[in-house]
Amino acid sequence: MAFSQNTYQLTGKVIADDLSALSNASVFVSQFSSGTYTDSLGRFKLSIKGGWNEIAFSYIGYHAEKLNLFISRDTVIEVKLKTNLELGEVSVIDRKQVLQALHDASGVITLRRENF
């Protein structure tokens, strides 16, 4: 493949679904095990080989995004990540009841003289 010998600049910006910049988002090229992080304005710059590249974008609290890009020249992209604020099941527990349950479940039997 003629493109695989050339290196190009992939630049861009990673933003949230509310259009705010995501600083320190991960930009990772899978097949070359290389990547970078975005700056404080959500921007990144990465040298990348020509041809097909799978690029993963991730940030804590957001769904990761993978793009398959065919790179044949310097390229500029913008990637929008969607929030992942799914909250699992929440349990509220009374500490006093938990301690009582632990005490009762210890297997200790107290015998008193009046029980005979």
Image (cartoon, rainbow, N blue to C red):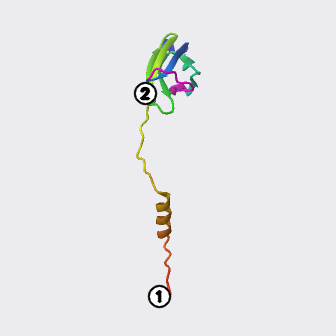
Which numbered disc, 1 or 2, marks the residue closer to the eye? Answer: 1
The residue carrying mark 1 is 114
80 vs 9, left or right, is: left
- Residue 22 vs residue 3, the one in the foreground: 22
Residue 20 at x, y = what percent? 49, 21
The residue type indicated by label 1 comes to Glu
- Residue 29 vs residue 32, the one in the foreground: 29
Magenta segment, which residues? 18-32
The residue carrying mark 2 is 82
The residue type indicated by label 2 comes to Lys
Q: In percent of the image, x 59 and y 21: which residue is there?
A: 40
Residue 52 at x, y = what percent? 46, 19
Q: In percent of the image, x 50 and y 88: which residue is there?
A: 113
Q: Is residue 21 magenta?
A: yes
- The secondary structure type at the circle numbered 2 is loop
The quadrant the C terminus occupies is bottom left
